[in-house]
Image (spheres, rainbow, N blue to C red):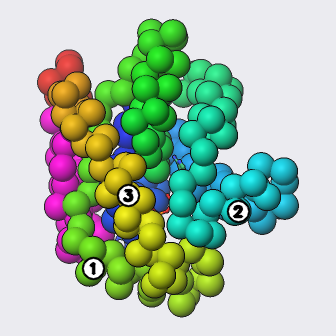
Amino acid sequence: MFNLVLFGPPGSGKGTHAIRIKEKYNLFHFSTGEYLRAEINNKTELGLRAKEFINKGNLVPDDLVFEIIESLIEKHKGVNGFILDGFPRTIIQAEQLDKAQTKINESVSMVLSLVVDEDELMKRLIKRGEETGRHDDNEAIIKRRFDVYNRQTSPLIEYYKNQDKYYEIYGLGSVDSIFGRITNIIDAYFANIK
Ligand code: B4P
């Protein structure tokens, strides 16, 4: 099974590219952010809890997020592979994922990290906020999300480098050109394991 972690700061293009990767490689795409937003829209108990954190630019607690991921993996055992978009976002989440996958003889295959500078990220997210009305896409909250990313999420870079699974992609340019960089890396991975 091919298990891809799509990694990067807020607005780096994870969601944008996940949709294309899913189509090209026939993988099951799961975005924790999208899932949590749907729960908020449906006013579920989980959504109400998650909203408090998301609207302040904070991460939702690890255990809450991990329960979602565990049941997802359990429900979709038969798929070709997963794109985990926006998960893991903390070392604890990464360790929880490793443990759960080891139990079923699986592991993360690769981590693709989209690298984009903060000025560009800010522009993209402000634009998205204006177009969609997303509550966490306003300047003050975006700054908080960058801070949370730098403190809580970026240590995962070392974590996955130590496992020899970390690949960086320059995330500026047209969506097509970035997608080309992504597919070069995935195709090389498949060519190597043949
Ligand atoms: P997410 O939904 O994952 O939010 P994101 O990081 O902003 O998304 P992404 O990087 O996918 O942005 P996109 O491609 O759309 O998470 C939201 C919140 O949920 C988090 O802050 C957190 O509170 C919570 N959460 C989620 N996962 C969690 C976890 N594991 N643990 C705890 N909490 C969690 O790109 C952004 C914009 O850029 C788009 O408008 C797009 O059109 C544009 N864009 C993309 N590529 C471009 C390009 N090449 N050029 C120009 N614009 C581009």
Q: Residue at x 27, y 57 (%)?
A: 114
Mark closer to the chain start, 3 or 1: 1
The magenta segment is: 166-189
Question: Residue 112: image x %, image y %?
Answer: 28, 45
Name the residue beneath numbered marker 1. Answer: 120
Q: Please name whichever residue, 19 or 105, is drawn nearer the observer in this view of the structure.
A: 105
Query: SS of the residue at dot 2?
Result: helix
Q: Is residue 18 visible?
A: yes
Q: Is residue 176 magenta?
A: yes
Q: Residue at x 27, y 33 (%)?
A: 159
Is residue 137 shown left or right of residue 112? right
Q: Determine whether 95 is above or below 146 in the image.
A: above
Name the residue beneath numbered marker 2. Answer: 51
Q: Disc 2 versus disc 1: distance between alpha carbons? A: 26 Å
Image quadrant in which the C terminus is located = top left
Q: Determine whether 17 is above or below 21 in the image.
A: below
Q: Residue at x 27, y 79 (%)?
A: 120
Q: Disc 2 versus disc 3: distance between alpha carbons? A: 18 Å
Q: Amino acid at mark 2?
A: Lys
Respond yes or no on whether mark 1 lies under 8 Å from ligand 1. yes
Q: Please name whichever residue, 60 or 172, is drawn nearer the observer in this view of the structure.
A: 60
Question: Residue 51: image x %, image y %?
Answer: 70, 62
Respond yes or no on whether mark 2 lies under 8 Å from ligand 1. no
Name the residue beneath numbered marker 3. Answer: 149
Question: Residue 176: image x %, image y %?
Answer: 27, 67
